[in-house]
Image (tube, rainbow, N blue to C red):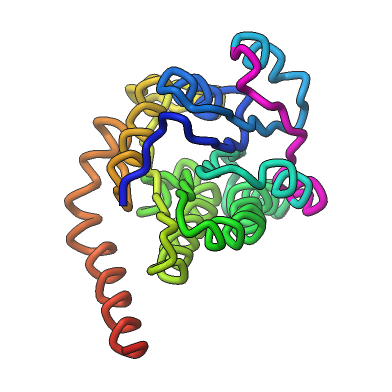
Amino acid sequence: MSQSIQDSIALVTGANRGIGKAIVEALLARGAAKVYAGARNPDSLADLVAASGGKVVPLQLDVTDQGQVDAAASAASDATIVVNNAGVALHGDMFDNSLKGPEREFAVNYWGVLRMTRAFAPQLKTRGSGTIANVSSIAGLTNFPMFPTYSDSKAAVHSLTQGTRHLLTGTGVKVLGVYPGPVDTDLAKDIEFTKETPANVANTILDAIESGAEEVFTDEMARDYAPAYEAGHKALELGTREMLAQEQA
């Protein structure tokens, strides 16, 4: 099931910088009718709003705040594309005595995506169409020891994406898993790898939405992970889906 970006209505979390901002800009460039841009501080969206000709609607949206998520679902009830992009990477020590960092990573990266999915999936199901795109990471497919707890949280997002896809099969709602490698954003500023530009990543994500893909590996490093994923993790997911289909038959 493909979905055209032209004339679509989208919501993007973490839209004030990095990949999120680039996605908003790419949506507008491809003719989206309206983009709800979520950020904890709506003032940080001023430049996007000013440049959009009225097409960007700023939302105060901290994905860890259930009240703000519910308000966003009400305000953006006409959204046909939901991009769960908001994320944090605190690069903490797995063996640190404090859980503050990992708890924050899970609060945003996993629980935030779950809150947004629970808020928006029912109205997309009622419409019988739409796309939920969850930004995980190649670190969610195999743990990167330089940021182990971030990897844990993104592995949880990967599992959540698979589960959501299973549960929405047959509803007309597409679920896209997004797996970037290093991207040139504030989140990855301390990572010493060759990094892809946010604009290229954003356009690759939109290409995947338009093609109806289930996964997208957004850059050269990430694409190196695709064959191993498809031979292993993906094979397990497809087997599970087949088993569920047989039980429902």
Residue 205: quarter of image: top left
197 or 134: nearer the eye?
Answer: 134
Image position, residue 198 (x, y; %):
43, 22
Query: Which quadrant of the rendered structure holds the C terminus?
Result: bottom left
Residue at (72%, 44%) from the top-left corner? 72
Q: Quadrant of residue 211?
A: top left
Q: Position of residue 179 (x, y in %)?
A: 37, 43
The x, y position of residue 99, in whole percent, is 71, 54
Q: Looking at the image, which residue sits at the far right? A: 67
| Up/down of 129 relative to 82, above or below | below
Q: Pick whichever, 159 or 37, lies toward us.
A: 37
Residue located at (26% from left, 62% from top) = 234
Residue located 28% across and 87% down the image: 246
Residue 89 visible in the displayed image: no
| Observer-nearest of 36 and 39 | 36
> Who's the residue at 59% across and 22% down the image?
17
Left/right placement of residue 56 relative to residue 8 reads right
Region of the chain picked out in magenta, as a range:
52-69
Residue 243 visible to an observer of this rendering = yes
Is 204 on the left or on the right of 128, as rendered?
left
Look at the picture and state if 153 lies above or below 14: below
Residue 57 is covered by the magenta coloring:
yes
Question: Where does residue 192 sit, x and y in percent of width and height?
Answer: 40, 24
Asked if residue 103 is positioned above or below residue 28 in the image, the reply reads below
